[in-house]
Amino acid sequence: MNISRRNLVAAAGLGAVAAPLGPLPAHAAPGRGKGPHQRVLTGAQAEADAGWPTLKGHRVGVISNPTGVVEDLTHIVDRMHADGVDVAAVFGPEHGFRGTAQAGGSEGSTKDPRTGITVHDAYGADDKKFAELFATSKVDTVVFDIQDVGVRFYTYIWTMYQAMRGAAQVGGIRFVVLDRPNPIGRAARGPLLDMAYSSGVGLRSILMQHGMTVGELATMFDAEYLPQEKEAKRLAELEVVKVRGWKGELFDETGLQWVMPSPNMPTPTTALVYPGTGLFEATNMSEGRGTTRPFELVGAPWVDHRWAERLNAHGLPGVLFREAYFTPTISKNAEKVNGGVQVHVTDPSRIHAPELAVHMFCDARDLYEDFDTRVITWDKYPWEWLDKLTGTARMREQLTSGAPAQQIVAAWADDEKAWQKRRRPHLLYPAGRR
C-alpha cells in the first residue's frame, strides 16, 4: 500500500494508537477513563475533537446508521452539521440510517428532519448505484462510520466495499473511514469464503470471523480486491481515522457505549455469540428473532431438555447452556412455543462462537429428526443458505454425512492460519490477546 498516497490518519497529529492521552473534552461521556476500562476514542471522536480536519473544506457524503455517534451519543451527521462540515448527502445501509427497518429492509429515501440533508436509501446498492449516487450528490469525499460486529455475513462491510468500488469508478473521490473497535476482538475463526458462494452476505474471500476493524478491512479491500475487479481501479485516496487506545480488547473493556448496529444486535454479548448462532438463520430453528435475546435464544417447537443437557456435557469454554422456552413474535416459528437453549456467556475471553455453533448443529442433528437446513427459494437459482453464510459447502456436507463437531472445526485450521498471515500487513492496531 502506498502510504504516502493513502494516508492512515490519526486525526491531525493525534499520533499512534498507544499515544499518551490528553484531558477529556468537555462533552466526553461521564466516568470515561475511570475504573478498570481504558479510555478508547473512536475515529469519529478523534476527528471531532480535532475539529474535523480531514473533512473541513470538502463536500461530504456520509454512509452511517445509528452507531455513528461521538461520546455524548450525538450522531456524527448532526455534529458535523453543527460544526460547519458541508454534509451534502447521507446514505443509509440495511436497516436504514436511523435503524428502524428489520433484517432485509431499509427506510427509503427522505430528508433528515433535523438537518434537511437528503438521506438516500443505499441498502443493496452495488458499485454502479453508489457511483450514480455519489455523482448525483456531487460529493468529493465519502465517509464511512458504522459499528461492525466482526463477522463476514454481517452486511455493513459489503456496503462499504461496494461504496469503495463506486467511489473508484467515479474517480477523484476521497474515501474516509472513521474507524471503530472490532467488538469481538482479534480472534480469527471459521472458514474462508469460496468465491463460488459469493453473495450479499459475503462478496469476497475473507474469514467468517475475521478479527479486523472496518478500517483495516478497507485497506485490505483497496490493496488486494479492488485491483481484481473488472474495472481494476483503486481509490484515488483512502484515509483511515484510527481508533485511539484500542489494543484488541473486547467491547465491554473499551468503556464505549454500545449502540445497536441493527434491531437484533442489542448488546455486546449478542455480538460475541453471533459468529456462531447467526448460522441458525440457515436452519428451520428460530435464532431468537422476535425475542429480547436474539442469537442467544435458539430453538424450535420440537426441541426438549435433552439439547441443553448434551451441550453442557461438552464443557465448552466460556459458555453454559440453559434449557429455555420462548415464543418469538416475528420470523421463524412466530407465535409458537419453542423449546431450546439460552447461550449464557460466562467468560467472554474464552468463547469460541463458531465452535459452539457446530456443537449445537451436530447435537440437534443427532437428537431431532425434524432438524434441517434451509434452501433459499426466492432466488433465480435455489441455493443452500448455510453455504452462503459459511462461504463453503463443506460444513453442510460434513453435517449431512454425520461428521462429529471436532472434525468440522478442524477443517478450518488451514483457512485460519492462512488468514492470519494474509491480514497481518493490513493491521493498524496490536493483534490483541485473542
Image (tube, rainbow, N blue to C red):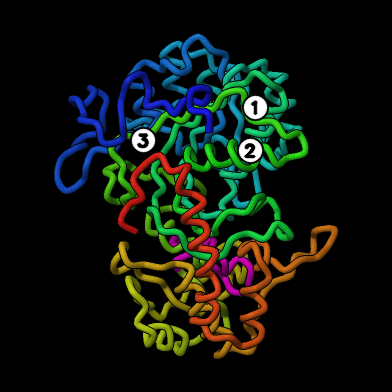
Circle 2 sits in a helix, a strand or a loop, which is it? loop
Q: Amino acid at mark 1?
A: Thr
Circle 1 sits in a helix, a strand or a loop, which is it? strand
Residue 282, compared with residue 32, is above or below; it is below
Query: Are the two marked residues, 1 and 2, in contact with CB atoms closer than 8 angstroms?
Result: yes
Stretch of the chain drawn in magenta: 279-296
Q: Amino acid at mark 3?
A: Val
Circle 3 sits in a helix, a strand or a loop, which is it? loop
Residue beneath disc 1: 110
Query: Mark 3, residues whose alpha carbon is within 10 Å: few (<14), some, or many (≥20)?
Result: many
- Residue positioned 55% across, 74% down in the render: 411
Left or right: residue 433 versus residue 260 is left
Q: Is residue 61 visible?
A: no
| Displayed quadrant of residue 226 | top right
- Residue positioned 74% across, 32% down in the render: 129
Q: Is residue 401 visible?
A: yes
Residue beneath disc 2: 107
Q: Is residue 282 magenta?
A: yes
Residue 87, compared with residue 212, is above or below; it is above
Q: Amino acid at mark 2?
A: Glu
- Residue positioned 48% across, 46% down in the render: 148
Residue beneath disc 3: 243
First in residue order: circle 3 vs circle 1:
1
Residue 111 in picture, x, y percent from top left: 61, 23
